[in-house]
């Protein structure tokens, strides 16, 4: 490309490089907040088959809040048990243990496998539903300039990225069939992916464009171009272990080929992961590097046939073969982490650009999705002017330690698959159980360990709050099924706490049949309505989300009285506000009561949350569904202090802040 | 159109006129069986908003077997209780009763409301997933010739329909915005409907075509053009009651405006039905015809404003108003039924073309969907050459009496909404409960009462079969959640019994740990495999479904031993057949065992079906998910006799039938 090329000049608030899981999750928030943003990808299309596939229950919970989990459930394959196979006394493989990996009381969802291509489809569809934002494929970033001087002015454009928009004249385009794997045709895609496979209309001539942006998110994978431009070093190293991965329709008499299994014999250890549409994924050790090196291996020697032979050797005397495979690849085990996740909180790295590790735990895509989810809402809400820009510092604070934890888990876990010592075979199940127990909360996503910050107000010494013992700031709201007061219909909180971009105050109202409690609710709601003394209502105190919501704060009330003994209109109006066109907000009052027609709506929410059924509590949930603040039902002052640290107030500087 | 117009000549196996719920369900089967078919509609697009909306649980079960129920659940509004409101002692409306209308033990689904437009979307998407069949909009049927002489030759084309394909030159096209209701724009449609709203590319000039067909299905509504061409009379009459229907976002302090409610006061009775996206449907009596007539009323006098006033009068002293409505219409209560549902079993009427009645029960769309579902698979399988054409006679036999039952229910039910006698108010709830109890099984679809025929082999005197007391031929399989033996994953039978076009033998294998029982299973499976004496295997005895399945019969095994105590490979191979590409059929063996991570997978299937947990039974389920035949586990001879009456055998005439 000549220097004389004429660059089109443009501006955008947020530029996202890379439209994989992490980039799409960040883009989801741009769509929900209505932010001016662009998302570019050098590939020609999205992923269709293969690649990452494991979804942890926590990711499914987030998908529910985005309105897409039902699509995953319909197509995906659920695993609720892991099976350990080792050679028995006669040397034949035997099932040593079933490990229950589904914690039914913890989440409505289970570990689910579905190709990354479908996950991308669902997020893309959601982005389109909420905005006109769409991925620009075939766009290659060529240079990044970052003007440090502008870093403290949130309205400035310190980032300039020059990109090349590939036209028909460019031969550098990755071949579509190669990018999408072999045997790619309409017959093995679902109809809603067909359009993406059709030849996209390209520019006749490759063009260049210079894009100025306020914020840049590099979601461009393990070999992140963005990270390299920023000269951020990567720490960690590769091991000498090389693995093959293949998605096949297995021809096998191994009994657990449709169950998540870890199979070890003297020839090695493989991982068997059942997937959608009859596919099973195999992770298979194929060879090691030349002695003393960690990078010299001959990739060309590794083929589907070689992987087949390795599985046959480990499965023996069970049979194994396949006629059809949909995707395969080779990777080298390694744990590598970017030294930083951000440059000045103007440029961010997310997903594989920050952490790469061995994919066998089914954690990689989850981490990447959740990285993008974490950084996306913060940037979008800051661009909207509603969030204080300094809150952006919490991205690295919250996600970088998790990347380190992920690598620690991988370093502990990976050798289980490589160690060929005979005694390993005997202890496999107990070893795995030990590791699983150590990392359980982290791996399943029940805990994220977000530390104290402006966004997370923990109790001193990380103690429990007496009035909401299991509502821990920095962690998720444990999902429960509640009954809508107005309609009577039960719904999981993962869906009623919709990821629409707002903070959410949960008024855990307790038992409003109790007169004292009713009085407390009235006091609280007067303050919420701004009717108590000089205090502004927290609902009316902060800048709006332009074009979306007048207030960045939504209120959900969850009471603990029996459903039939109270009425929707028993609650003060501020808890079920009236809109002159949309009427009363029927989706704002919920009831923790058992319901005869739904076995999961069992009236145990208050117990699961550790909240007194009469006295209730007050909780703030962040836009990304993590708990930010917990207080007593009456503590609106504490709540307001929390929000003041995060959100930009409406009244101009100089006006008296009633809480100061 | 001049006589000299040049008609394009074409042939199709099945022509469907009308792409509403009934026509689309019939078309679903054409897609699943890969039949040459066309579906035309005079409208320019599908329905988008308003129209029918009530889905009974039984319809949801069928949708699950088609793979689309999760889309309805995600968008629709569920009603599990009906509330009766009448004036209390002080004259103010009080809630007289909650009536539980959800039978949780009977079905995984509840009554669900969602606009017909979305239902059409989901069926259309499913049709596209399985075929290249698509609705041809803007095509008007102009003449029907039927050559009776050809009626007994299944390969002949006795039907000739001349159609006009509207081009841009035709001003006769129904206006799109009118057809779709007011306030129709991209903002109140979901994104997957946007494409349908875009201007369809039309022919420049209107064209004419003469289509020859083997079979014709008239799904063209209450004023059925097909029915008129056949000169089939309509019986029944209109009443003098005129009703308005409107879908609004209500502004009301009536406590149950988001619950299914029947509200009566001296000003009349209205029906309140909560729907998707904050909409509520109101059925409102607006006036009666002039005295002594049943057809003179001035439609122009009825407006949304008038309907509003009527609701206000009945809701008083509760408030009622609206700023937004998405759809409204006026209808006259009447019960009308076509004298026949078919002409020679070559031309069929389905849906509103057969039965019209008042829409308030939320049964109309369900009946129409189920009509189309019933007629569609039979015609498609007959065209495929697999089903004996004489089985087509069962369409009228099964569905016409239901149309009569529907009208009887409507005649009993409708007056409840018109009767203004003061004493009615007091007895409303008990009267409604009586009627509901009488029609419960029918209205909910738990029973369809299909009579004895070649497709339905009932026990003598309609007795229960001792070995499967609650498996009644002519009725549905009561849904249960079973655990897949190979995977361990639970699934409702409504989904595992997929509507893929095949008959399905349910081998209820009992407890195969029992040695005697294992022996019985082996004897059965030898016969199933055609290895016992001279008998052909029933799986290999009938003609294939060309291009789809080698055998029109699928086998599902459901055993009653604990899941962990048996293995997939314990079952004889014929029950889990091997395919050289697809491997073993892992989706064929199911287990009736409780499962700790799913509260609905509770190991009670055998009890619900009235089957002995050791001895099991044998059941044949028709392609439309109704039970056709029930027998003892060993009664393969009885089973084969049943299938011989329905399906076309493979061996040529002259060869000896082993059962003769």
Image (cartoon, coloured by chain):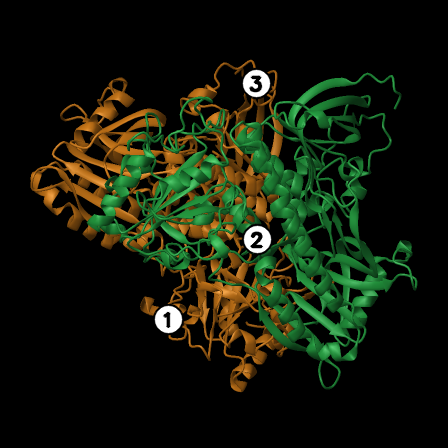
Chain colours: A green, B orange
Image coords of residue B207 (percent x, y): 59, 20
Tell which subunit mark 2 falls on.
A
Nearer the observer, B344 or A176: A176
**Would residue B368 be visible to someone looking at this image?**
no
Label 3 – label 2 distance at C-alpha: 61 Å
Whether residue A586 is situated above or below residue A114 in the rendered picture: above
Q: Work out whether disc 3 and disc 2 sit on a shared chain.
A: no
Whether residue A8 is situated above or below residue B122 in the rendered picture: above
Label 2 – label 1 distance at C-alpha: 52 Å
Label 1 – label 3 distance at C-alpha: 59 Å
Residue, disc 2: A448
Q: Which quadrant, please, contains the N terminus of chain A?
A: top right
Whether residue A417 is situated above or below residue B625 in the rendered picture: below
At label 1, counting other C-alpha atoms closer than 10 Å, the crowd grade (few under 14, some 14-19, many 20 or more) is some
The residue at the point 53 percent across, 80 percent down is B512
Q: Which quadrant, please, contains the C terminus of chain A?
A: top left
Image coords of residue B459 (percent x, y): 37, 68
Tell which subunit mark 3 falls on.
B
Tell which subunit mark 1 falls on.
B
Residue, disc 3: B167
| Quarter-of-image position of residue A26 | top right
Nearer the observer, B641 or A612: A612
Which SS class for mark 3? loop
Which SS class for mark 2? loop
Q: Work out whether disc 2 and disc 1 sit on a shared chain.
A: no
Residue, disc 1: B469
């Amino acid at each position: 490309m000549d220097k004389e090329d004429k660059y089109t000049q443009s501006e955008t608030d947020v530029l996202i490089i890379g439209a994989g899981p992490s980039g799409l999750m960040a883009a989801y928030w741009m769509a929900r907040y209505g932010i001016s943003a662009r998302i570019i990808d050098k590939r020609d299309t999205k992923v269709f088959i293969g690649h990452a596939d494991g979804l942890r229950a926590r990711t499914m919970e987030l998908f529910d809040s985005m309105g897409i989990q039902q699509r995953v459930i319909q197509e995906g394959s659920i695993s609720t048990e892991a099976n350990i196979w080792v050679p028995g006394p006669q040397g034949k493989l035997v099932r040593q243990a079933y490990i229950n990996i589904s914690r039914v009381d913890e989440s409505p969802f289970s570990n689910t496998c579905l190709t990354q291509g479908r996950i991308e489809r669902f997020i893309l569809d959601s982005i389109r539903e909420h905005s006109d934002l769409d991925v620009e494929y075939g766009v290659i970033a060529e240079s990044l300039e970052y003007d440090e001087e502008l870093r403290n002015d949130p309205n400035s454009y310190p980032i300039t990225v020059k990109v090349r928009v590939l036209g028909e004249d460019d031969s550098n385009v990755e071949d579509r069939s190669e990018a999408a794997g072999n045997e790619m045709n309409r017959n093995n895609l679902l109809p809603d992916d067909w359009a993406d496979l059709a030849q996209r209309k390209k520019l006749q001539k490759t063009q260049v464009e210079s894009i100025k942006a306020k914020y840049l998110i590099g979601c461009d994978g393990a070999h992140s171009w963005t990270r390299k431009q920023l000269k951020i070093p990567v720490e960690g190293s590769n091991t000498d272990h090389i693995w093959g991965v293949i998605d096949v329709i297995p021809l096998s008499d191994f009994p657990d080929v449709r169950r998540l299994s870890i199979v070890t014999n003297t020839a090695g250890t493989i991982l068997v992961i059942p997937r959608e549409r009859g596919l099973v994924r195999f992770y298979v050790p194929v060879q090691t590097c030349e002695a003393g090196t960690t990078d010299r291996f001959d990739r060309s020697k590794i083929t589907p046939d070689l992987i087949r032979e390795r599985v046959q050797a480990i499965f023996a005397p069970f049979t194994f073969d396949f006629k059809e495979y949909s995707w395969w690849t080779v990777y080298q085990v390694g744990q590598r982490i970017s030294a930083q996740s951000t440059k000045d909180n103007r440029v961010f790295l997310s997903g594989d650009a920050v952490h790469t590790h061995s994919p066998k735990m089914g954690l990689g895509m989850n981490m990447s999705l959740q990285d993008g989810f974490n950084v996306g809402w913060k940037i979008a809400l800051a661009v909207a002017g509603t969030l204080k820009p300094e809150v952006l510092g919490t991205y690295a604070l919250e996600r970088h330690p998790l990347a380190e934890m992920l690598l620690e888990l991988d370093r502990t876990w990976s050798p289980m698959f490589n160690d060929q010592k005979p005694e390993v075979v005997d202890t496999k199940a107990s070893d795995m159980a030990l590791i699983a127990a150590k990392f359980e909360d982290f791996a399943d996503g029940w805990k994220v360990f977000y530390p104290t910050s402006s966004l997370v107000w923990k109790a001193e010494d990380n103690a429990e709050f007496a009035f909401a013992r299991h509502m821990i700031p920095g962690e998720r709201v444990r999902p429960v099924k509640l009954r809508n007061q107005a309609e009577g219909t039960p719904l999981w909180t993962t869906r009623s706490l919709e990821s629409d971009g707002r903070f959410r105050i949960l008024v855990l109202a307790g038992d409003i049949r109790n007169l004292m409690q009713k009085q407390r609710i009235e006091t609280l709601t007067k303050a919420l309505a701004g009717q108590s003394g000089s205090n502004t209502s927290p609902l009316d105190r902060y800048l709006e989300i332009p074009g979306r919501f007048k207030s960045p704060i939504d209120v959900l009330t969850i009471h603990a009285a029996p459903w039939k003994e109270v009425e929707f209109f028993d609650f003060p109006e501020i808890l079920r506000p009236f809109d002159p066109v949309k009427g009363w907000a029927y989706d704002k009052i919920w009831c923790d009561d058992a319901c005869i027609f739904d076995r999961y709506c069992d009236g145990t929410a208050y117990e699961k949350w550790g909240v007194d059924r009469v006295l209730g509590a007050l909780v703030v949930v962040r836009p990304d569904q993590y708990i930010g603040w917990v207080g007593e039902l009456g503590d609106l002052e504490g709540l307001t202090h929390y929000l003041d640290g995060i959100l930009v107030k409406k009244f101009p500087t100089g006006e008296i802040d009633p809480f100061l």
